[in-house]
Amino acid sequence: MDLPDSLKESAYIDGANHFQILFRIMLPLSMPMLAALSLFTAVGHWNDWFAGAFFVDNLNLIRIQTYLQRILSASSLSMLSGDNRMVQEAAARQGDLKNMTVTSVKMAAVMLGTLPVLFVYPFLQKYFIKGMLVGSIKG
């Protein structure tokens, strides 16, 4: 809605139809907005652990965020109760029980959940920068 009507009018004068105006003028100018919305939507779906916790019964099919949330809540509960069974089992598999703490498990879970978003963001960053530059040049 922020795109000026004069762009459409000048395209009509030059002989463009509705589809040409949409695909050659409006869509390229809307790419920063579409990139921002798609990134926010993708991050929202990526971080959604709630649906997996309630709708998936098979533990082999749960999403990574649901699994990480279970690790974090189990480690928090084990800290309160003094039972670090889940952390001890994971550390025993690695053979490094004395160096593994609940905090290290939490930080590893946070990194696993963050890495995919960090890999996608640089590809969408050019659209954010372009959107900021276009928005600042209005006159």
Image (cartoon, rainbow, N blue to C red):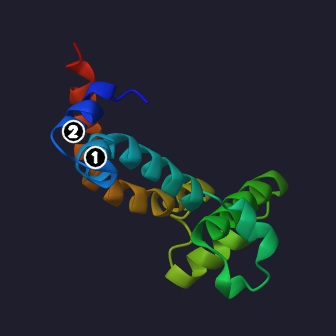
- Please provide percent x and percent y for residue 122: 26, 52
- Please provide percent x and percent y for residue 104: 53, 58
Q: Kindly identify the residue that appears in the image at 37 percent across and 48 percent down.
A: 35
Q: Is residue 44 above or below residue 130?
A: below
Contact between marks 1 and 2 (CB within 8 A): the answer is yes
Q: Quadrant of the C terminus?
A: top left
User: Please, what secondary structure does the residue beneath circle 1 have?
Assistant: helix
Q: Amino acid at mark 2?
A: Ala
Q: Residues within 10 Å of mark 1 (few under 14, many from 20)?
A: some
Q: Quadrant of the N terminus?
A: top left
Instruction: Tell me, yes or no, if residue 27 can be seen here.
Output: yes
Q: Which quadrant of the view contains residue 89?
A: bottom right
Q: Which quadrant of the view contains residue 126?
A: top left
Image disc number at residue 21: 1
Q: Amino acid at mark 1?
A: Ile
Image disc number at residue 11: 2
- Please provide percent x and percent y for residue 127: 26, 44
In the picture, measured across the screen, residue 107 lies left or right of residue 115, that is right
